Image: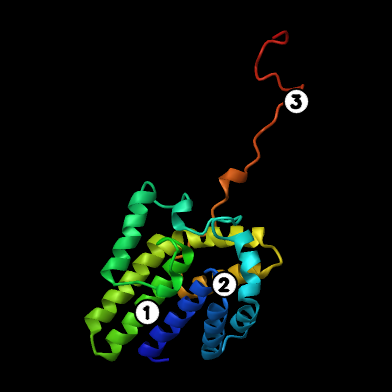
Amino acid sequence: MDPPTQHLARAARYRALALLFAPPDARAAGELAALASNLGDAELAALAADLGPDAEGEYHRALGFTGAVRDGESDYEVNPLGGKGPLLADVAGFYLAFRYEDATLVGLAPDHLSMELGFLGWLALRAAFARHEGDAEGEAVCVAAAENFARDHVGRWAATMLARLRAAAEGGFYDAAAAYAQRALEALEPGRVAPPVVDRRRVALPTLDDSDACGLPPDA
């Protein structure tokens, strides 16, 4: 596969991943099916067949404002930037530098998983165009930005979010979608996807019983 085709295939992969975790509708299902056909990906085609308006209820149970799993990077404690403000500013800085906007993902926060995955797809498209135009420097800038964004943003939290999504949606569409996405990310970003972080909020606290006096005198 020549470099422009590699960039375009990468863009298609990331666009498909972005659609998997955006609010479902018929348009997204149709686009996902077309991407699966172009990529020759039977597993993605099966996911596309299950996506659409009928999946809306499952989406709201699993993701979004009402779902069991948070879908924004700033909801996870795996960034070194010290809070939501600096993190969101860094993400927005990447988007602004490369003029990234996606009218099909309107309403999603900048750090939503679909927005971040879509941005990696956008960078791949820009790299393909630069290659086509003979702009080696522009291509290198896009490739480097994608590696940095994958390492410093998507790679820091995506595996944690996807693991929690699989647990929350066990046996359902989003279980299958998260498993597919995890494998795809590991293939697209070797060495840049951190392993899942244990959800500390779910750690059971110790309980006291009659045999535990907490160091107090027997008659206390």
Q: Indicate left or right for 151 with 158 as reference.
A: left
Residue located at (62% from left, 42% from top)? 203
Could you say where residue 37 lies in the image, as x and y percent from the top left?
55, 90
Q: Amino acid at mark 1?
A: Ala
Q: Indicate left or right for 21 with 109 as reference.
A: right
Task: Choose between 144 and 100: the one closer to the eye.
Answer: 100
Q: Which mark is residue 124?
A: 1
Mark 2 highlights which residue? 24
Residue located at (45% from left, 70% from top)? 105
Mark 3 highlights which residue? 209
Helix, strand or loop status at disc 2: loop
Of label 1 and label 2, which has the lower sequence position? 2
Mark 2 neighbour class, 10 Å CA radius: few under 14, some 14 to 19, many 20 or more = many
Label 1 to label 2, Cα distance in Å?
24 Å
* Above-or-below relation of 115 to 75: below
Mark 1 neighbour class, 10 Å CA radius: few under 14, some 14 to 19, many 20 or more = many
